[in-house]
Image (cartoon, grey):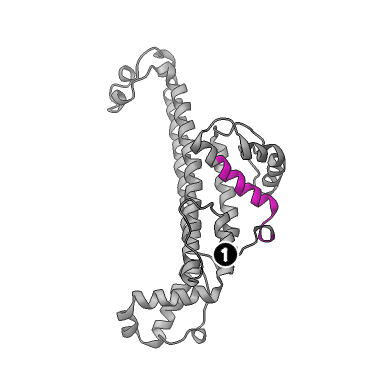
Amino acid sequence: MKSPFLSVFRNQLSELNNRLSHYIFVWEQFSLDNAETLAKKKGEQTTEAYQKNRFAPQYNVVLDKLERSHDETSTFILKSLFILLHTEFEVYMRDLYEVARKTDDTLPDLAVKARVPDKIFENLNIDMGASFEQKEIWTLEYLRLRRNRIVHSGGQSKGELAATIKNRGNALQRYWQGRLTRGLFGVNFQSEETDQFSKEEIFDFINIWRLLTSKIDQIVCNRISEAKIVKYLRAEFADERPGEIKRWGAIKSKKKFIGYVKMQYDIGLTLDAVDDF
């Protein structure tokens, strides 16, 4: 059993991975193709050296400073991608929680500023200590604190994040080095410089998010329960297809619903397990 939101989040991770790889490739090829120009005309402006480029006037710098400018742009992009990763994770968690609320009307609404995923687990009575490895919990905390540090001030780590790095950084480094199939390429959980990112570090975080969300999805879906999810999907299926269900008849409607449940939550049902519509 897995939620459709996990597939959406994984697709977003893959898209981000592909776009970052494309950006890296294009700049590397530009550097190779323009090495001679950059060396011979380093005192010229981009508008002079690249007169056929219609965007040159919008970005007019001396070629000698182009590399440094690219580094600054790369830092901005990588930082933004890290923030985006965490934002998309929170969207995924909120979508998953909304399904839980639709299956149980006693669950409270989730405040806009609620700490995610902690508040969701609390509302669902999921004991993080019993459901996750300690280092997985520390990782979620590290990611949240680092995101907050960048959004609110950036620069050197302070407060809770500094304490996490000092007291748990080494353990997290060893844990993910062994947990990821190919180890870590760029992440350094012990580094106090939390405002800078390498491209390898973003790729590491993508892989970490893949593993964490796979486990989170299973835990939350199990907490909601297969029976409640099927009941919710049945009501949704019936509400959206009243005309089709009448036209299909009992057996075909059941088969369509079985396929729908399989597609949405990867739950396998039999005809005998489905009541007539």
Which residue lies at the image location 48% right of the left edge and 67% below the top edge? 101
Residue at the spot 32% in from the left edge and 80% down from the top edge = 242
Q: Amino acid at mark 1?
A: Leu
Residue 25 percent location from the top left of the image: 46, 35
Check the image and report above or below for 194 versus 5: above
Q: Secondary structure at mark 1?
A: loop
Identity of the residue drawn at 28% across and 21% down: 51
What main secondary structure does the magenta stretch of the protein show? helix
Check if residue 258 falls in the magenta segment.
no
Is residue 144 located in the magenta-colored stretch of the structure? yes
Q: Residues within 10 Å of mark 1 (few under 14, many from 20)?
A: some
Residue 265 image position (x, y, % from top left): 50, 68
Q: Image quadrant of residue 250?
A: bottom left
Task: Check the picture and name the quadrant holding the C terminus.
Answer: bottom left
User: Vertical placement of 109 versus 231: above or below?
Assistant: above
Q: Is residue 110 visible?
A: yes
Query: Foreground: 158 or 146?
Result: 158
Place of residue 153 in the rendered image (x, y in percent of width and height, measured from the top left) = 51, 33
Q: Is residue 7 visible?
A: no
Residue 275 to residue 61: above or below? below
Number of numbered discs on residues: 1
The vertical placement of 132 against 180, above or below, is below
Which stretch did the figure color magenta?
A: 130-146
Which residue is identified by label 1? 124
Quarter holding the N terminus is bottom right
Kindly indicate the quadrant of the structure image that contains residue 120: bottom right
Q: Nearer the viewer, residue 268 or 75?
A: 75
| Image coordinates for residue 137, horizontal then vertical, percent | 64, 51
Q: Residue at x 55, y 34 (%)?
A: 198
